[in-house]
Image (spheres, rainbow, N blue to C red):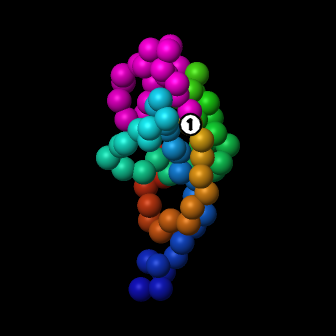
Amino acid sequence: TERQNEMVLAFILVVLIDGATHETAGVAAFRNITRCKLSAKEIETTGQTWASERVYKYNTTIEAYCVPKFLPKDTKFWD
């Protein structure tokens, strides 16, 4: 139906570890950019990713940022 096809603006959390995209089983989507950015900062600061409890060593380069994207309204959001 038309209602099921509704799209909303979301923010996707992207994590790079030593320059390579950290793959997960799903998409870390947020409705609120501030919450997405807080998660990104926490990952960069602690070295802990949302997909595992593995803590990366300090010499590992971790970058995290949010990308805007339209997603279906019924997507699972993390905020």
The prevailing secondary structure element of the residues shown in magenta is loop
Residue 63 is situated, as x and y percent measured from the top left of the image, at 56, 33
Residue 20 is situated, as x and y percent measured from the top left of the image, at 44, 38
Q: Which residues are magenta?
A: 46-63
Quarter of the image with the N terminus in it: bottom left
What SS does tag 1 mark? Answer: strand
Image: 47 above or below 37? above
Residue at (48, 20) in percent of width and height:
60
Residue at (44, 77) in percent of width and height:
4
Name the quadrant containing residue 40: top right
State left or right for residue 33 relative to residue 74: right
* Residue type at numbered disc 1: Ala
Q: Which residue is mark 1?
A: 64
Farthest residue, direction bottom: 1
Image: 43 above or below 55? below
Farthest residue, direction left: 25
Name the quadrant containing residue 38: top right
Residue 31 is situated, as x and y percent measured from the top left of the image, at 59, 54
Residue at (60, 41) in percent of width and height:
65
Residue at (49, 35) in percent of width and height:
19
